[in-house]
Image (spheres, rainbow, N blue to C red):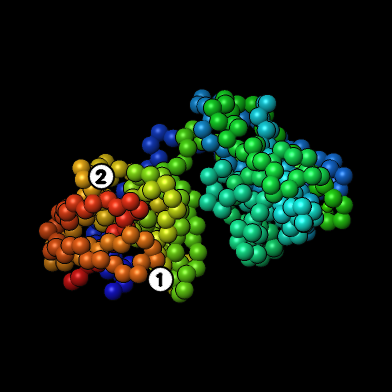
Amino acid sequence: MDLIRCLRGAAAAAVLAGACCGSAAEYQFSTNLVLELPDGGGIGTFVQHEVRDISWPLAEVAVTLDIAGSWSGDLYAYLNFGEAHAVLLNRVGRTELNPAGYGDKGFEVTFEDAALNGDIHQYRVTYELSPPLTSSGALTGTWAPDGRTTDPAEAVDTDPRTATLSVFEDLDPNGIWTLFLADMEPGAVHQLLGWGLTLRSEHSVGMPQLLVQRAGDGVEVRFLTQAETVYHLEGTEQLPAAVWEAMGSVVGTGEQVTLGPFPRVGKAGFFRLRSGTGTSDPPSSRLQLHRAEGGLEVRLRTLTGLTYHLQATDGLPAANWENVASLPGNGGELLFGRFPASGKARIFRVLVEE
Ligand SMILES: [Ca+2]
């Protein structure tokens, strides 16, 4: 039985809450440029942006970089604010054995310390030589900054990563932010096409980055969880979405979780993640997981005339789904029962039968 199709009836009847962000504040800046970098010799280019009138201390910083060129391993980039210094790029791919670094064609990337992809310096190792590239050959995705403060003429993968974006944590963000960019080796030229800054008043841990990957005929969605947090993955076929459908709910363990594979219906699907303890959530078609004494309580808003089969597994992709309860819908919120929380993430799905 197809999970998405099965849930459709219930999802259409439910009132789904809009995105919520609590009281978190966010400031965003981005700009497009065409700035040729001097080729070789490490003569850098500075670009600056002044932030004003922000009344909260920084919790988290994200940076976007759009660079065109033909040998990414030439590049060195850092972000400075006051005394704080974060190294974004330091000769990607450079190791003792490969001092020239990677020869890809630039970057269209976001830097965040918590990025699921991890350290950008070794991105070809992370992706076993098939990293996500744009049609023009630039690396894409969200990556953790290089963080190595080593002289870019000497930097290698084994250097410690001490200058990540966390250096800006707790600072007053008002003032001049400076991006420095240099092409260290003669021979391949680069242009800065744009950059951006996102400043956040809270860590966006409740909404981790989603990584959507092909899996067979469908796609699967990976994300990094926080322990004890309940996540609800929702999907839609197009944006703006009339309805977000429940795709799965999971209790975080501090580890990565993979949900899916989900069938791709004609075009690419869109996913979003909601998190919370569940108790303040409005009724919806989502499976609601509540921490309760001795385990997890699983609830679902139901319709009469349908039968709901709750199934569980300990890991995805699931070898088999264990049937844990089957109940007729009552037109209200149905409590499936209380289940022991195992050591790892326990993953539930519901099948709806007419
Ligand atoms: Ca160069």
Instruction: Determine whether, in the image, residue 334 is placed left or right of residue 26.
Output: left
Instruction: Determine whether, in the image, residue 269 is placed left or right of residue 121.
Output: left
Q: Which comes sooner in the sequence, label 2 or label 1?
A: 1
Residue placed under numbered mark 1 in the picture = 263
Q: Residues within 10 Å of mark 1 (few under 14, many from 20)?
A: some
Q: Residue 139, percent across and down?
A: 66, 57
Kindly identify the residue that appears in the image at 29 percent across and 52 percent down. 342
Q: Residue 175, percent across and down?
A: 64, 26
Indicate the secondary structure of the residue bearing disc 1. strand
Q: Nearer the viewer, residue 321 or 13?
A: 321
- In the picture, which quadrant includes the C terminus? bottom left
Instruction: Name the kind of residue labelled 1 in the image.
Output: Pro
- In the picture, which quadrant includes the N terminus? bottom left
Q: CA separation, marks 2 and 1?
A: 30 Å
Kindly identify the residue that appears in the image at 81 percent across and 44 percent down. 153
The answer to whether mark 2 is within 8 Å of ligand 1 is no
Residue placed under numbered mark 2 in the picture = 291
Q: Is residue 320 above or below residue 100?
A: below
Indicate the secondary structure of the residue bearing disc 2. strand
Q: Residue 21, percent across and down?
A: 40, 40
